[in-house]
Image: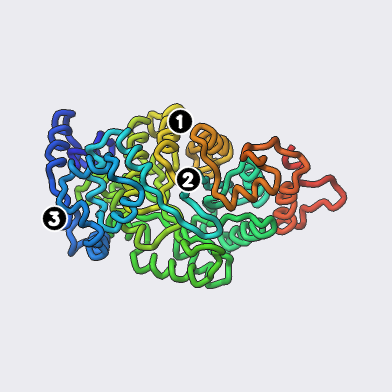
Amino acid sequence: MARATPARTGDYLAGVAAVSAEERVAAQITLAQVPLRRFLEEDVVPYEQDEVTRLILDHHDARAFEPVAGLTVGEFRDWLLSYECDGEALSALAPGLTPEMVAAVSKIMRVQDLVVAGRKARVVTRFRNTLGLPGRLSSRLQPNHPTDDPKGIAASILDGLLYGCGDAVIGINPATDNVEQVSALLRMLDEIIHAYSIPTQSCVLTHVTTTMRAIERGAPVDLVFQSIGGTEATNHSFGVSAALLQEANDAARRLRRGSIGDNVMYFETGQGSALSANANHGVDQQTLEARAYGLARLYEPLLVNSVVGFIGPEYLNGKQIVRAGVEDHFCGKLLGLPMGIDVCYTNHADADQDDMDVLLTLLGAAGVNYIMGVPGADDIMLNYQSTSFHDALYLRQAFGLRAAPEFEEWLIRLGILDTATRLKAANPRHPLLALIDSARAAYAPEEQETDSPRSGDRWLE
């Protein structure tokens, strides 16, 4: 498995990568001949040592697996690319696949194979809107601020909404991770969403235990966020367990805040997290990433996001990041997850915006559920390069995609889109500009100037 993986710096650091292209090809040829059933008989990470392995095998659906039970990894690839394999067949098959199976087949597929097969798989989830439908592309509006300033956050939210972004979630990474600050941000997002009847959901991406404390204090929690990994030891380093995730899932569902669905979990992952935690068990990072998806699907999440270029020194360059992003989307979709990809990089990698445009375009062709929307594509709190509000518009225009249907109707009703779903020029007196005023009044009332021009206009200028 490890030797067959396309070159990845993290695998070299872990000492498990192929030492040459010849060895890699030999491993891929050998892997193609392995029966899929073998992954049910031989653990990549020992069953008795790892909670994730136990959950994967104990929840395996033998009946769903039956249509491909007699295939080898290579034959499975051929079936995935055949006309016989369609979205309905993949949806039925997903509970019967283990992460190791989909990781294995991805290792012997070209990028175009991963795009074609990933495009067939559609995973639809719901909370206040419907995500993942064919012909739709959603975006997370990510209004992070280095000091959690409500005015700065509100300005970014306004900017994103006026570009038609935010249907996946309005999600803030807090600069200060404590229950008081998280609760304040949650209240701000809740007031904005309800004041303008926006058919979307909010999330503050804090640790799951902080979110649970916020729920106990009556904070308006829509989604519960948590970073997860593909081994028990990795998740221990994150301070979580399967039982804790289930407790959080149950707590959020009891709030019944979703108007059309109860998918309440938001997970983020990334190749290399297990290596960073010294918890990789000698397994390659891409297989462990797929195992994280095997854990995530137990909780029926609304969103799963691979932050593919953000983790650390696990990727040398843009080529590795591009390949990893397409792999992650493919593996997550085959396992039945609503996959988004943070098309991103940090300055440790030899990558640039051209590389990100290539990955973004490939994911648009592959039917990714959502991408990130960061003001200017530069996250000023997390200090990394991601995708902008304009990038979501690019994908929608290039591939004829549209926002989630409920969110699209809202955009048309407010005059942000025209009836042909094209973005209209921003009106400087648009009613949404009051969003900034309301945030300032609620969270900085001592600064409100009652006799001045509208503060929203002044800030926007």
Residue at mark 1 to residue at mark 3: CA–CA distance: 39 Å
The reply, left or right, for residue 131 in relation to residue 457 is: left
**Kind of residue at badge 3:** Glu
Q: Quadrant of the C terminus?
A: top right
Vertical side of 424 occupied by 223: above or below: below
SS class, disc 1: helix
Residue at 68% across, 37% down: 424
In the image, which disc is placed on residue 370?
2
Badge 2 local density, few (<14 within 10 Å), some, or many (20+)?
Answer: many
**Kind of residue at badge 1:** Asp
Image position, residue 74 (x, y; %): 18, 41
Camera-nearest residue between 207 and 201: 201
* First of labels 2, 1 by sequence position: 1
Whether the residues at callouts 2 and 1 have beta carbons within 8 Å, the answer is no
Residue at mark 2 to residue at mark 1: CA–CA distance: 15 Å
Q: Nearer the viewer, mark 3 or mark 2?
A: 2
Disc 1 target residue: 357
Camera-nearest residue between 448 and 244: 244
Q: Quadrant of residue 272?
A: top left
Camera-nearest residue between 247 and 184: 247
Vertical side of 157 occupied by 215: above or below: below
SS class, disc 2: strand
Disc 3 target residue: 42
Residue at 58% across, 71% down: 218
Q: Is residue 94 visible?
A: yes
Image position, residue 255 (x, y; %): 53, 70
Residue at 50% across, 69% down: 213
